[in-house]
Amino acid sequence: EVQLVESGGGLVQAGGSLRLSCAASGFTFDDYAIGWFRQAPGKEREGVSCIKSSDHRTYYVDSVKGRFTISSGNAKNTVYLQMNSLKPEDTAVYYCAAKPSCWNWMAGDNYDYWGQGTQVTVSS
């Protein structure tokens, strides 16, 4: 059974940090890229970042460049999203998703698997 399980969300003050984790199982991790998405109430889902562990390439939406870092490797089959200098506009449910590559990574409709999401709330 394929599973993507997000964790690490919570409530933090503006300027603070959180580290999200996405634990993957049920598929060959090295054959897939992991993307992070977020969706705030009343807004469309937005691609945040993408990584494919086997080639170490990373991608970010402009609004998080320099603040967020995507990585993998600390734990087997896990991808992290380190979020620093958080802003109230980062408040959203954050999801991880998997597909074979980061090509066209911001388009959420071509991912094979999705997690259930974790809430991130940034207070001002």
Image (tube, rainbow, N blue to C red):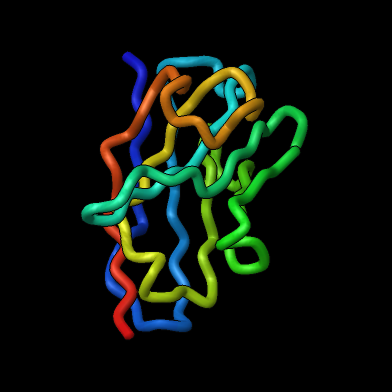
Q: Which quadrant of the figure has residue 119?
A: bottom left
**Viewer-side residue, 112 vs 88:** 88
Q: Which quadrant of the figure has residue 113?
A: top left
The residue drawn where x is 40% and y is 82% is 14
Relative to 34, 103 lies left or right: right
The residue drawn where x is 49% and y is 43% is 47
The correct choice, above or below, for 56 with respect to 102 in the image is below
The correct choice, above or below, for 40 with respect to 6 in the image is below
Locate the N terminus and report the quarter of the image it occupies. top left
**Viewer-side residue, 37 vs 24:** 37
* Percent coordinates x, y for residue 65 in the rendering: 64, 61
The correct choice, above or below, for 35 with respect to 1 in the image is below
Locate the C terminus and report the quarter of the image it occupies. bottom left
* Percent coordinates x, y for residue 12 in the rendering: 34, 77
How many marks on residues? 0
Relative to 80, 8 lies left or right: left
Relative to 76, 109 lies left or right: left
* Percent coordinates x, y for residue 84 in the rendering: 54, 72
The residue drawn where x is 44% and y is 49% is 21
The correct choice, above or below, for 54 with respect to 50 in the image is above
The residue drawn where x is 66% and y is 32% is 52
Q: Most extreme residue toward the left, as rendered?
A: 41
Relative to 52, 40 lies left or right: left
